[in-house]
Image (cartoon, helix red, strand yellow):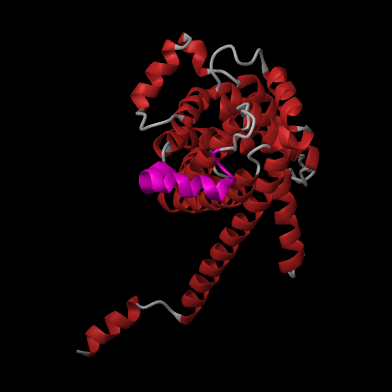
Amino acid sequence: MSNTVEKVADKLPSKEELKEDVKKATSSSVQSLRALVAGGVGGIFAVVVGHPFDLVKVRMQTAERGVYTGAMDVLRKGIARDGMVKGLYAGVSAPLVGVTPMFAVSFWGYDLGKQLVTSFSKVENGQFSVAQVSAAGFFSAIPQTLITAPFERVKVLLQIQGQKNLAPGEKPRYNGGLDVVKQLYREGGIRSVYRGSAMTLARDGPGSAFYFATYETVKRNLTPKDPVTGLPGQLSMPAVMAAGGAAGIAMWIPVFPIDTIKSRLQSAEGRPTISGTIKGIYANGGYKAFFPGIGPAMARAVPANAATFAGVELAQKAMRKMFDKDE
């Protein structure tokens, strides 16, 4: 009996081991919380800088053929109809409310993804490989989709509503983001609110993998090294923004056709299917029909994502100053 008790006691962790485990768990939780907050700050930066470009992209993706001659025509008509502010920021309420938690969850998911990668594979010298970063980036899109899909559905409907010329006395169909959600739920329940979720994940999974992998790769290449010790130095804010801009371009190029399908699916009347939407887009102009608005999307990718990572890095730096006593 005593031998059995001794064996069990040997297997139990010591007081020092328990303290170390608690310390690691607490550190991991704090790190995840900081990633959540920093991602939210980055999201606000992204919306303020990138919404006008996104507005042009969505209107070009969803408009009938021949309505616009190009991106500048979208801007010109929008500003002439609604004025400078509304012409550039129509539908901004939905992404401003939605993008903050969306980016927060994305960066939190990325941090959690890195923790999962660490538990399943070996990280050499504390630095993740490109494949490991890509895996963590793909994982970040899974929880993010729960927020992204409904908010993008609302955003798209408000953006295309803004391009309709109302008859005298005619009122807009929607009176804001909350009204969109109410009407969608009334018409088709939660499935209507979340229409386009599969395509959102199909876009954001690989897109996020390219996004974070490119950011980390460019960031490492731009990080200065001490000529004596060889240790990495402090990365400048212009370098952070350059890495963020490159990440934005890398994200959009491979998934843009999926984004077009998603926008059409989320803006269509009735109950469209993915296959039907794809056939309809192709019938409207072949393969080129999957790339309307790619110019504004690429133009948006650089400043918006540069702003995103600038916001994230500034928020992380501020939190380190506030909470890390050693610094």
Measured as percent of width and height from the top left, residue 32 is found at: 56, 59
| Residue at the (45%, 52%) spot, across then down | 116
Q: Please check the rendered image and state whether residue 190 is part of the magenta-colored stretch, yes or no.
A: yes
| Residue at the (77%, 39%) spot, across then down | 224
Q: Please check the rendered image and state whether residue 248 is part of the magenta-colored stretch, yes or no.
A: no
**How many labels sit on residues?**
0
Measured as percent of width and height from the top left, residue 19 is found at: 51, 77
| Residue at the (80%, 43%) spot, across then down | 228
Main secondary structure type of the part rendered in magenta = helix
Relative to 221, say whether 284 is above or below: above
**Outermost residue, left direction?**
1
Q: In this view, does 25 lie to the left or right of 196?
A: right
Measured as percent of width and height from the top left, residue 73 is found at: 70, 18
**Outermost residue, bottom direction?**
2
Relative to 295, say whether 51 is above or below: below
**Any part of residue 243 in sight:** no
Q: What stretch is highlighted in magenta?
A: 173-194
Q: In this view, does 14 lie to the left or right of 273?
A: right
Quarter where residue 294 is shown: top right
Quarter where residue 188 is shown: top left
Which is nearer the eye, 203 or 155? 155
Can you say which quadrant of the picture contains the N terminus?
A: bottom left
| Residue at the (64%, 30%) spot, across then down | 168
Quarter where residue 157 is shown: top right
Can you say which quadrant of the picture contains the C terminus?
A: bottom right
**Any part of residue 228 in sight:** yes
Measured as percent of width and height from the top left, residue 290 is found at: 50, 18
Q: Is residue 45 left or right of residue 136?
A: right
